[in-house]
Image (cartoon, rainbow, N blue to C red):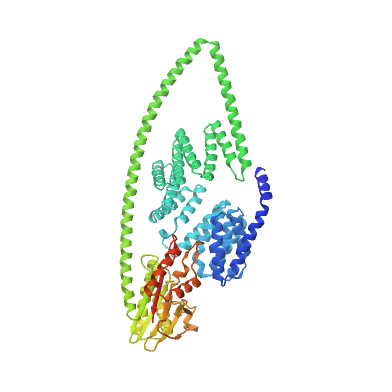
Amino acid sequence: MIKRTLLFLLLITTIGSVFAQKNYIDSIIKVGLSKENDSLKFDYIYSNQVIALFGKGRYEDITYLLNKIKNKKFITTIPSNNLSVHAGLGTLNYISANSELAIEHLGYAITLCDSFPEILERKPDIISKLAVVYSDLGQSEKAKSLYKEAISELLIKNDSLEIDYSHYFNLGAEYLNQDSVQQSIPLFKIADQIAEINQDTLAIINCATALSSVLVKEESFRQAQIYTDKAISLSLQIEDTAGYANGLLALADILDAQNQVDKAIVINEKAREILYNYGKISRYLEITKTSAIFLDREGYFEKSSQLFKEYIKLSDSLNLSKANEQLVTFEAKYENSKKENEIKLLKKQEEVRNSQAEKKNILIIASGFGILLLIAFVIFMYKKLVLTRRQNNLIKSQKKIVDDQREVLTKKNDQILDSISYAKKIQRAVIPTEEQIKTNFSDAFVFFKPKDIVSGDFYWQQKVGDLIFLSVADCTGHGVPGAFMSMIGTSLLDKCVIQLGITSPEKILNRLNIDLHKRLSVNKESDVKDGMDLFVCCIDLAQMKLYAAGAYNPMYIVRNKELTELKGDKLHIGNLEHVKDQSYTLHEIDLQKEDIIYLFTDGFPDQKGGDKNKKFYYPPFRKLLTEMSGQEMEAQKEQLSNTFSNWKGDLNQIDDVCIVGVKI
């Protein structure tokens, strides 16, 4: 009743702001729909605005927005956009406790994955989200079936240790909820192994705490203690407050299971204090309630009643009535216990008044009992000292194991970095230097900035007779996978021009498309969808002619500060289906002295930054090239570098960047 009254008052006082918020969301949709293409519409509405609203916790606004756009053409006609919207609505309805709608949207998202191969890889994550919904509904068997299906989907293309640990962890937790301890242990151990391989400390802490809980149920207290110490030690190292509190609670469970109730209560209280002091209120409320139940079971009725009053005061859940019932029960027990103690005290006082001799006997007995308590206290302190020393030794040994493992992982990481650094030298040896490009033109520059150590972008030059061939390419991915593709691309371009003698750029692209598809389809069982986007130029300085053709990438020519764009065909290199019905377009341009040719990938225009954390985009990129075209080429390169750094700011670089400019 209290909850509903507060909600009613809140609705009265905020109804005006609700309409204002809806108008704000409608304005976001209106601005997004005005963008020039479907990609920009989705980027603005979903990638920018929805993500920003989610970070502010405005779930109702996001739900309203997604329901407004879910039937728009730029959503329904693009599978990845459609999937994102319905998966988002599923998650939001789950957060809002609307399980029926959550299941409906997530089920539709799974159907989309099955219907469109390009989004099939996202299916396991959607299945896992659906499993969480069913788990909260108490349908544990359905949840387990879905978790297993998600893992099976992932194992088709991944090794068991390459899957995110959460899939095994959640399935293990589902078995544990049904008291299927033996089935949960191997799943938690696989999750722990994956977390160790990935050096994910938070995941390692979660797995250690879970393994401690199941081992307590198996009465394997020594092994449970090892995992608990590990969780506590790692939590302290990374200052993870929640993980440290959960470790203390696991330790309390071990002590309680070994009938060390008083110690368990002290440690349990310490965990509650930590959670409260660091603002972990949700977890604090949960532990407060379970502590009240635990104390009631052990006969501490006054303390359990206090804890339940505290729980009622702070809780904002929908189960207040049930909690109040439990509070009444605990208070009744406390009052009964209090009255019983008062009766006993009155009887003792009456007995004392009736017999001085009996009082003397009671004092003697009390003294003897005090001596026994003193002896018991000394024994207790001695055992505590021994236990503390044992635990300290155990922590030291565990720390040594962790340090040794860290040293091994550090060495392996250094070896991997050394290998990648050597691969960088190989890649740089294959592509031409800036000086080699300058020898064929009056001036030139190369702005080459890989995202990682090695790059998926590359530039290429060959000279055959009077013809100069020049290209800039963007391979699928970046880092090591992209670098492999760049090596293949360089090799195939050399083959086209040097071995096969092909000089026309559109024929070079056609041949490159065929050869790359063959190279990536040697094994019939492979399912490689990689390729590259590029623009190839053939420059005849004797005749002052430019012949060019492109696959997706454009290129620019600036003459007297006027920019001309040559657009590439929407045909990816590496997809043999394209060459069955059509070919690449050949562009022929008459050149003049001082013309500047710019070849580039999408890394610079797509970089996010600035005050609003948005992409640089192509119109400002074209304006930048046009305005700086009158400068020396080295000055242009420096301006590109400064502009890129200033725009990016403290954000991460999202893709490889490659821009080549040559002056005729």
Extreme-bottom residue of the structure: 543
The residue sitting at 47% across, 61% down in the picture is 152
Vertical comparison of 488 with 82: above or below: below
Q: Position of residue 387 (x, y in %)?
A: 37, 35
Q: Position of residue 176 (x, y in %)?
A: 49, 48
Vertical comparison of 221 with 607: above or below: above
Res 107 → quadrant: bottom right
Comparing 193 with 70, the one in front is 70
Q: Position of residue 334 (x, y in %)?
A: 58, 30
Q: Which of the image's four quarters has the C terminus?
A: bottom left
The residue sitting at 31% across, 72% down in the picture is 429
Vertical comparison of 553 with 194: above or below: below
Q: Which of the image's four quarters has the N terminus?
A: top right
Residue 41 appears in view: yes
Comparing 190 with 195, the one in front is 195
Comparing 10 with 558, the one in front is 558
Q: Position of residue 206 (x, y in %)?
A: 45, 49
Comparing 270 with 330, the one in front is 270
Vertical comparison of 276 with 579: above or below: above
